[in-house]
Image (cartoon, rainbow, N blue to C red):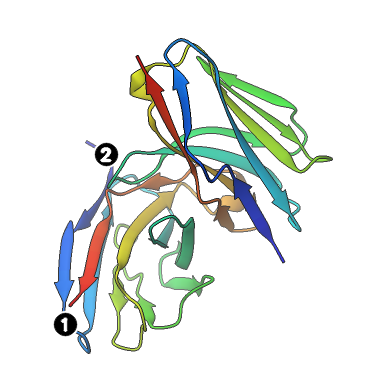
């Protein structure tokens, strides 16, 4: 089955700890994205990558870091510098960058809670 | 400032009726607009895309309109069913990013 997976589904972290969220896709998509969703809020873009070994900051990149060493993988690290990390994190992919009007395919999300 | 506004209050309708959801935007010039469905605790699922030069798009029971003069998109679900109950998100596209609205919750009752 083709798709996009995220792990873990639920994640608990103590304040001051870094944590890495996994995102893998087997759709052979070039572009991948990370969003954050807070209750009653729209999705906000954290980082995106249009191609392997390249990524750009989105609207709320502070306190986050990413890597794109492989086409199918786009892990997100939430660092201790992120002031309010508790949220629902969504990873997405598209065939190419959105300038080509492509739909995004989303993973099931990871709910991060900072204790 | 840029804004994307969707009905903040939940929309409750009776099964079989047409649901109409609104997406208004300001200070954007989107090349296209997308609609997604999101169920609780899950990732959004793509439904429809409409480009700036298109007025209307249909897919089965779904219809989207796009009025760049009014800066508004309407999303219609005809013959609604309880299974259509979900949150619907509009997203404006320009360049390499999508900008999402907060979504409208739809509840279809039997």
Q: How many marks?
A: 2
Which residue shows up at 57% across the image and 51% down it? A98
Front in this rendered view, residue B15 or A85: B15
| Residue on which disc 1 sits | A14
In this rendering, is residue A59 above or below B108? below
Numbered disc in front, either 1 or 2: 1
B25 left or right, relative to B104:
right
Residue bearing the label numbered 2: A2
Q: Secondary structure at mark 2?
A: loop
> Image check: A61 left or right of A70?
right
Please say if B52 is above or below B85.
below
Between B42 and A70, the one nearer to me in the picture:
B42
Circle 1 Cα neighbour tier, 10 Å, few/some/many (<14 / 14–19 / ≥20): few
> Residue at point 29% right, 76% down?
A77
Circles 1 and 2: CB atoms closer than 8 Å: no
Same subunit under labels 1 and 2? yes
Q: Quadrant of the N terminus of chain B?
A: bottom right
Residue A61 is situated, as x and y percent measured from the top left of the image, at 46, 77
Q: Is residue A104 above or below residue A54?
A: above
Residue at position x 52%, y 70% in the image? A58
Q: Secondary structure at mark 1?
A: loop
């Amino acid at each position: 089955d083709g798709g996009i997976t995220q792990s873990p589904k639920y994640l608990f972290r103590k304040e001051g700890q870094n944590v890495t969220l996994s995102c893998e896709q087997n759709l052979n998509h070039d572009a991948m994205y990370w969003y954050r969703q807070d209750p009653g809020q729209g999705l906000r873009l954290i980082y995106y990558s249009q191609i392997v070994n390249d990524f750009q900051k989105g609207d709320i990149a502070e306190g986050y870091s990413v890597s794109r060493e492989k086409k199918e993988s786009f892990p997100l690290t939430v660092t201790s510098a992120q002031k309010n990390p508790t949220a629902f994190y969504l990873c997405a992919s598209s065939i190419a960058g959105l300038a080509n009007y492509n739909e995004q395919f989303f993973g099931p999300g990871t709910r991060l809670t900072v204790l | 400032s840029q804004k994307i506004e969707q009905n903040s209050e939940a929309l409750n309708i009776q099964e079989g009726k047409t649901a109409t959801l609104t997406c208004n935007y300001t200070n954007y010039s989107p090349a296209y607009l997308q609609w997604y469905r999101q169920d609780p605790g899950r990732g959004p699922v793509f439904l429809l895309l409409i480009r700036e030069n298109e007025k209307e798009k249909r897919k089965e029971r779904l219809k989207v309109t796009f009025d760049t003069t009014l800066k508004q998109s309407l999303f219609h679900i005809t013959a609604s069913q309880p299974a259509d109950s979900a949150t619907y998100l509009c997203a404006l596209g320009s360049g390499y990013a999508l900008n999402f609205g907060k979504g409208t919750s739809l509840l279809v009752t039997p």
